[in-house]
Amino acid sequence: MIKRMMQTLVATLALVLLFSPAGQARSLDDIIESGVIRIGVNPNFPPMSAYGETNEFEGFDIEVGNIIAERLGVEAEYVPTETPQRVPFIVSERIDISLGALTRTTSRSMLIDYTVPLHTEVMAVLTTDKVMAEMVDDLNSSDITLVNIRATWPVDYNKERLPNANMILVDSIADTVRAVAQGRGDAIVENIDFFMAHTRNHPDVNWRVLPEKLFVAYCGIGVQKNNHSLRQFLNILLYELHSGGKINELWEAAYGAPMLVEVEPTPFF
């Protein structure tokens, strides 16, 4: 695990060097004075964020970004930011903040700062009423076929945790859900929150999520290191939005299901 974290940090540092140098770091006052906040969002991650029919960004992150911009009294400028670019774009000051399911990790925290959690992502099991399982270890059988996205870390996790299960690999979240709906697979062991919206494409299937939570990750908003004024503003705003239920409302509207583990708002950060 430590070796993997160091490899990730080294790779990220390499990207930081590739994308540097860039513009000057912008404080909260700078952003307000400029009239624009630059928000990094993933262009290929629906319903978190993606291009819509009018070629404008839409999704959960966009709704959150619009609220942030509105509270600041500025315009939101959405910058396409692929997953590997998120930290380098913050460090090199190409964006002011990064959304896009930015999980808090120790390696990233050496390079950027985080707000309090915006949302969670929960590793759990998505399956159907055709599978007689109540716990993840019930899937460790040659009668079970798991579906995973190729080249993602849950592939290795499932091979180690559930070595007796079969596995098929596909290319996208939508493909995994479709494979289970069509009966080619039995279950998905993944960060299930991101998969729930796709179950709506298969309404004839009786979907269920097993109650066991394998891992809960907390995703914050990424900001530049030591940008205290911007981070403090965002933390206060997130407390208000969580306390009023707004974040969970936006999440359910985007994903078609409540967040599996809701963020408990705290006034302390």
Image (cartoon, rainbow, N blue to C red):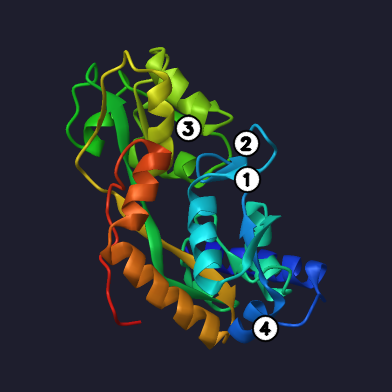
In percent of width and height, residue 15 lies at 74, 65
Q: CA distance from mark 3 to mark 4?
A: 44 Å
Q: Nearer the viewer, residue 28 or 7?
A: 28
- Write down the residue under mark 1: 57
Question: Which quadrant is home to the C terminus?
Answer: bottom left
Residue 154: x, y in percent? Answer: 45, 43
Q: CA distance from mark 4 to mark 2?
A: 30 Å
The kind of secondary structure element at disc 2 is loop
Please report contact status of discs 1 and 4: CB closer than 8 Å, yes or no: no
Q: Amino acid at mark 2?
A: Gly
Question: Is the residue under label 1 in contact with that under label 2 (CB below 8 Å)?
Answer: yes
Give the mark, 1 or 4, whose residue is nearer the N terminus. 4
For this view, does 139 lie left or right of residue 81? left
Residue in the foreground of this view, choosing between 251 and 31? 31
Label 4, secondary structure: give it.
helix
Which residue is painted at 30% across and 27% down in the image? 127
Mark 2 or 1 closer to N-term? 2
Query: Which residue was labeled with disc 2?
Result: 52
Q: Say which label, 2 or 3, has the lower sequence index.
A: 2
Residue, disc 3: 148
> Amino acid under label 4?
Asp
What residue sits right under mark 4 in the picture?
A: 30
Question: Which amino acid, mark 3?
Answer: Asn
Q: Mark 3 or 1, which is nearer the eye?
A: 1
